[in-house]
Each structure stands twice: as C-alpha cells, then as structure tokens.
Image (cartoon, rainbow, N blue to C red):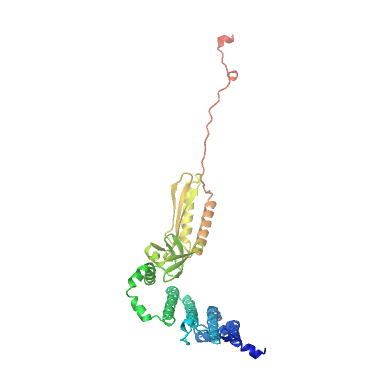
C-alpha cells in the first residue's frame, strides 16, 4: 500500500491525513506555547514599559502572564487542529447537516475555556497594574494609598469575573443577559438577605476607608488580637500578630468591636517595682530614688512625666516604684531603650550597696530547756549537818 493511499484511508469520517494534521498542530502548539507566550508578553510589556521600566517589573510581568497565555495559545492551536476533522452527524438531527450535536457541544465547551482563559489573562494584567501602584504608593508618606491599592485591585478582579460570567451566559448559553439583570430586581431582596454578611463586610470596608480608624502598618488590638495591619480587603482585614501568625478578621468585626490603635500612642509606658532587701537603709533608698529619677528625666528618649518613688513596705522587701514613658512606637526600639534603662537602674542599686530582694521566709525555732538528771543537780546542805 502506497503512502498516498494510506493517507487517504478514512476512519470515523476522517482520513489519516486529517488525523495527522490534527496531531501535528496540537504537538506544535504544546511544544512552542511557552516560547510564543514569552514573545507575546514581551510585546505586551512594551505597551506598559513607560509606566514601569525596571527589570523587576518586567520579570513580574512575565511571571504573571506566561501561564495564562500558555493556556490561551494552546486553545488557539486546538481550534485550528479541530478544523482539520469532520464530526459525524447526530442521528436524531440527520436533516441538519450544519449543526451536528457533538460539534455544538464541543464548541460550547471550547468557548467556556476560552472565556475563562481570557479572563485569567485580564485578571493577571490587573495584578500587574496593582503591583505598579503598590510600588509607587510605598514611596509616598501617606498610608491611605497603601490600603486603597489592594482594595481596588481585588474589587476590579471580582467585577472582571462577574462580567466574564455574564458574557458566558449570553454567548455560550444564549441567555438574555439584559432580561436576567432586570429580573434580579425582583429577587434582589432574597439575594441581599442571603449575602447579608458579605454586604455588611463590604460596607464596613468603605467605613474603614472613610473614617480611617487604622491604616496599613498600624499596630492594633481588637477582639483579643494584637498585631500589625498588613492588608485591608473589601471583605476582611489581614493582621500579622506579634507571634508572626496571619489572622483574617471580617471588616464588620473591625468596626463593631472596641479597637485600640497602639500606633497612635505618642509614648510607650513602662511601669515596674524595684524590690530592695529590708536591711537597705533610708539614706540608700533616697540616693537610689534620686539617681534613677535624674537619669530617666535626662534620657533623650523619655519625657518629664516619669516618676520614681519609695512606694511601700512589702511583705519581704522595700518597694520602689519606677514609671516612665519612652518616646517611640517602634517595638524593637522600645525594648532596646527599656533594656538600656533597666541596666542603668541595676547599676545604680549596686553602686549604692543595696541588694535586690526575693520572696523569702525566716523561721525561728525555740527549743524548750531540758531538765537535768538528779545525779547532776547541785545539793546545798544546811550548816548543822556539815558539823
């Protein structure tokens, strides 16, 4: 059998040549989809190059778009490959030679994948735009743009997917989208009731942006959670706790519960007691209190509201109260300054010859006097008996 005869051999309504063309196009698309996607991303990046011309942005652009473009390009090659085949007619629709059932089903499935792939590319492009604005907002002093950028990025991605879903209903399934949107007004109450919590969180996010009880980077305490605000979304707020865990809190809880914005504090308060032993003299305590007070008042990172006082006589020590305020909101700087002052306090106490007390008890044991035996007793005899 000649090659020409073999290629013309028909199987399931298609020749061997058709199947070879089909497989060849798919194989070509599978092999070169990565290369072609890199070329396409390079062309697309030239369109946005003037907005961000650094090497890091170009790397991020390729990282975001290569994968969805590979899927989209492969779907394009799949379309051309399928054109090489003839689909058998549906027996129930033998009279309709232009619309076989299998071909209609396959084409609608293909449309769904194409719409999803295109939407994926657009959302990744939105991620890149958000990345550019994030880099620009990081260079500004205001923190409002730091939280607006991720909010609108997520909001735009949701709107893109909703629009893609409506396009899919209209183009693939033939649904009257305008009538569907108009019909949503009738069932809008039921939908709003079902999405009550999501709507409350969405409205709470707008309240956060308008009222600004906190911004990205603030250290807050809410609902027993203490941490730094990392992201404010349209449904929830992400908090990095002091234990470095990542907590997601609904926006409604962020405005309904009492919130303590620790970043807005002008000073950090330090308060503790110095426990001195009871053999510390009054003169030593006066000197220690005076020197600690002078050191705290003269420290460049404290204010004049600090107080050092001989407070009370404790059950096992003489207690000196130390209260002062550190002029910083940074946690690392706060603990460094607190350590510096604490070292100085220990030095002052040791230089004045005092000692730190610790919980202790003194137990006094009294033993009863033992009676001497009769043989050891001193007997004094009368003088008349001694004659």
Choose between 109 and 289: the one closer to the eye.
109
- What is the tally of numbered marks visible in this picture? 0
Q: Quadrant of the C terminus?
A: top right
Q: Quadrant of the N terminus?
A: bottom right
Choose between 363 and 15: the one closer to the eye.
15
From where the camera sits, is residue 114 visible? Answer: no
Q: Residue at x 47, y 59 (%)?
A: 296
Instruction: Where is residue 172? Give x, y as percent.
Output: 44, 81
Residue 203: quarter of image: bottom left
Horizontally, is 201 left or right of 5 in the view? left
Q: Residue furthest right?
A: 1
Choose between 260 and 302: the one closer to the eye.
260
Instruction: Where is residue 29? Give x, y as percent.
Output: 58, 84
Instruction: Where is residue 339? Give x, y as percent.
Output: 52, 59
Look at the picture and state if 10 lies above or below 229.
below
Look at the picture and state if 313 lies above or below 171.
above
From where the camera sits, is residue 147 visible? Answer: yes
Choose between 96 and 255: the one closer to the eye.
96
Instruction: Where is residue 17? Give x, y as percent.
Output: 60, 88
């Amino acid at each position: 059998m000649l090659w020409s005869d073999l290629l013309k051999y028909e199987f399931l309504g298609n020749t061997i040549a058709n199947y070879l063309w089909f497989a060849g196009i798919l194989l070509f698309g599978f092999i070169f989809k990565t290369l072609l996607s890199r070329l396409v991303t390079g062309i697309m990046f030239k369109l946005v190059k003037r907005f961000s011309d650094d090497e890091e942005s170009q790397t991020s652009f390729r990282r975001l778009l290569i994968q969805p473009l590979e899927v989209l390009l492969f779907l394009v090659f799949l379309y051309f490959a399928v054109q090489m085949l003839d689909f058998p007619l549906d027996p129930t629709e033998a009279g309709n030679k232009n619309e076989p059932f299998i071909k209609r089903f396959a084409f609608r499935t293909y449309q769904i994948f194409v719409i999803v792939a295109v939407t994926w590319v657009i959302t990744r492009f939105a991620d890149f735009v958000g990345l550019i604005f994030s880099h620009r907002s990081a260079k500004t002093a205001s923190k409002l743009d730091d939280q607006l950028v991720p909010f609108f990025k997520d909001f735009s991605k949701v709107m893109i997917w909703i629009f893609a879903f409506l396009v899919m209903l209209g183009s693939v399934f033939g649904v009257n989208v305008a009538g569907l949107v108009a019909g949503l007004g009738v069932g809008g109450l039921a939908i709003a009731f079902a999405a009550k919590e999501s709507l409350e969180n969405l409205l709470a996010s707008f309240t956060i942006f308008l009222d600004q009880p906190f911004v990205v980077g603030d250290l807050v305490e809410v609902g027993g959670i203490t941490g730094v605000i990392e992201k404010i979304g349209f449904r929830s707020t992400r908090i990095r706790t002091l234990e470095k865990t990542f907590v997601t809190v609904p926006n409604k809880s962020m405005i309904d519960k009492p919130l303590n914005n620790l970043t807005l504090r002008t000073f950090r308060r330090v308060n503790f007691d110095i426990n001195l032993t009871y053999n510390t003299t009054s003169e030593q305590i006066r000197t220690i209190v005076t020197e600690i007070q002078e050191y705290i008042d003269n420290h460049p990172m404290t204010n004049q509201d600090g107080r050092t006082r001989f407070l009370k006589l404790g059950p096992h020590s003489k207690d000196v109260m130390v209260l002062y305020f550190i002029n910083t909101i940074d946690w690392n700087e706060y603990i460094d300054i607190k350590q510096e002052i604490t070292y100085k306090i220990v030095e002052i106490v040791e230089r004045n010859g005092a000692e730190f007390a610790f919980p202790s008890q003194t137990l006094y044991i009294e033993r009863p006097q033992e009676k001497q035996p009769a043989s050891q007793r001193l007997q004094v005899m009368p003088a008349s008996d001694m004659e």
